[in-house]
Image (tube, grey):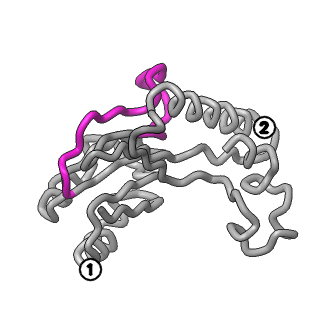
Amino acid sequence: MKVATWNVNSINVRMPQLVGWLEANDIDVVCFQETKTVDENFPIAALKELGYDAAFMGQKSYNGVAIISKFPIEDVQKNFLDDDDESPKRIIAATVNGIRIVNTYIPNGTELWTDKFTFKLDWLQRLRRFFDDQCSAENDVLLCGDFNVAMEELDVWSVPAWEGKLHFTKTARAAM
């Protein structure tokens, strides 16, 4: 099974590129982040025409995650179990072809040690609990998405330029 992940930065704006890319490549499953659309405007009909089923949740102008698949999508979970309807739309999980796929759009954090950075660190702790509570080491699980964390030096173009910056801090890497 071929799986891809794409921070699409507005799925409706990117539909022409997305359609061309899907037609040119044999991709079974795609996980999208930053779909930036409410559910009523998600392009489900266009994706079905291309042979994809979809599980998605979004919000206007921000966030939003989706999983599209040529295989049936089962056991969908939208957001964390303790989130409410107003929570940012940042995690969707589903079982596809026997594999639990967890698609995340991890918070950016904006600036170090602000409320948004603390939200990012807290969100990562919640993600850890999600895996501890809901995923088993005996099962196939795939975590994908936009992590907003550069884990290794090879993940940045210049270590001196990035050291201590938002996505390349020891704190964020440890939380991830």
Residue 89 vertical position relative to residue 67 in the rendered view, above or below: above
Amino acid type at mark 2:
Thr
- Residue linked to disc 2: 114
Q: Residue drawn 18% across and 47% down?
A: 72
* Residue 24, label in figure: 1
Residue 122 vertical position relative to residue 32 in the rendered view, above or below: above
Residue 123: x percent and y percent?
Answer: 61, 34
The single residue placed furthest to the left in the displayed view is: 49
Q: Secondary structure at mark 1?
A: helix
Q: Quadrant of residue 156?
A: bottom right
The single residue placed furthest to the front in the displayed view is: 138
Q: Residue drawn 19% across and 53% down?
A: 71
Residue 111: x percent and y percent?
Answer: 77, 47
Question: From which residue to which does the magenta span run?
Answer: 70-92
Overall secondary structure of the magenta section: loop
Q: Quadrant of residue 56?
A: top left
Residue 57 vs residue 40, the one in the foreground: 57
Q: Is residue 80 part of the magenta span, yes or no?
A: yes
Q: Is residue 86 part of the magenta span, yes or no?
A: yes
Residue 142 vertical position relative to residue 121 in the rendered view, above or below: below
Q: CA distance from mark 2 to mark 1?
A: 43 Å
Density class for disc 2 (Cα within 10 Å; few <14, some 14-19, many ≥20) is few
